[in-house]
Image (cartoon, rainbow, N blue to C red):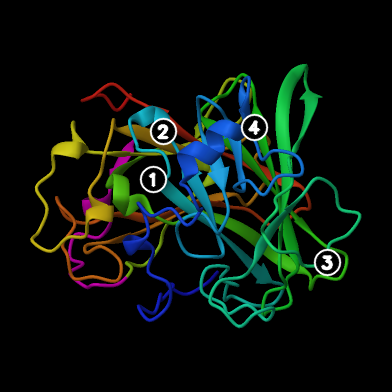
Amino acid sequence: MRHMRVRPPSLSVAIALLASLAWPGGLAACAQEASSGRWTRPALGVDSPPLWGHAEGLRVGLAPLGGPRGLLRIYAPYLGQAEGRVINFMAVEPIAKGQTGRGLSELEFSRLDQKPGKRFWSRNDLADSSPLSPTPPATGWLESVDGVECLRVYVLVERFDNGAHVYVRLTFRADRPHEVGVATFAHADSTPLEHCIITATMGNYARLRRLELADRTVEAAELWPAYRGDGFTPHARFPLGELKRTPSGAAVAAAVSNEPDPESAAYAPGTREGWRYVGRPARQYWRSDHPPDGLEVLVNGRTVYWASQSSIPGGVAFENFEMVAPFRNGEEFWFGVEPITIGATE
């Protein structure tokens, strides 16, 4: 597995962009035009924003929507978040066979244009995997899965420095409005992979501190009681045997805040506006419906907001939150952001 990630402040600073909208005219107006019925998706033949998901639920976007390149943007406006405000980001981080370091979609420079962040672009099919501009985006397609209408779209990623050449498929199910399925694939010309990790990278925004496992809830402060640095803590790791299981056998790990009302927190002077939580609290979770042997959940934490010296209210909180499994083409994990009653964690 990789060493602790270092994010140079000289690269893209997500914190300053959380509330920004790179799309001309604003995300809210463009997304509304592209919404039809239960789905939000780009309009066919129109240069609309790269945004897919539930019209009244969770959505996923790509650059040039606000934020760093090389990341999926996760939106949950049903929490009371403003349109265009990101609840979390996801990075794509493949590990080549025989290596321990990760490819870093957010931090590696693009060989296509020499800008920080690997380029992501969308497709409705895989007939042509050559690099494209992120816009105009693919519309996504509708299909029935287990009798349920689903919206799907491929997100292709330019080749990583370690030789990994991967892509992901996003799936939104009509009966699960607060989650997205993320399946990972390798192109035939990719270097062989140990893992292809999708990591939720911004738990500090919601100040996630409680990790819900099968028989216990782990607090961030218990994992790193003595940590006082301004970087990332070491990873804490939890194997499959410690994860909650559903009646169907799915493995689930969820992270929540320990604050009844995170919107009312008192922030250190100088904390950027983008880090100030807005809206209802929520449970953020990963689920594997068919958990493979070797699956683990990893978290690390921070005591100050990234690219700053501003202390996180309440102390150390989870930053990266991920499920990790040996690479298998088409492996799918589900990520959800579920509203919870204020003061409740169950």
Query: Which badge, 2 or 4, is on the more N-terminal residue?
Result: 2
Q: CA distance from mark 3 to mark 1?
A: 31 Å
**Image quadrant occupied by the N terminus:** bottom right
Q: Assign a secondary structure to mark 3.
A: loop
Disc number for residue 85: 1
Query: Which badge, 3 or 1, is on the more N-terminal residue?
Result: 1
Query: Which badge, 1 or 2, is on the more N-terminal residue?
Result: 2
Q: Residue beneath label 4, please?
A: 172
Q: Residue 302, image x and y in percent?
A: 28, 62
Residue bounds of the magenta highlight: 216-231
Q: Residue 74, image x and y in percent?
A: 49, 45
Disc number for residue 130: 3
Are dots 1 and 2 in contact, CB under 8 Å? yes
Q: Assign a secondary structure to mark 1.
A: loop
Are dots 2 and 3 in contact, CB under 8 Å? no
Q: CA distance from mark 2 to mark 4?
A: 16 Å
Image quadrant where residue 111 sits? bottom right
Q: Tag 2: residue type? A: Pro
Q: Residue beneath label 2, please?
A: 77
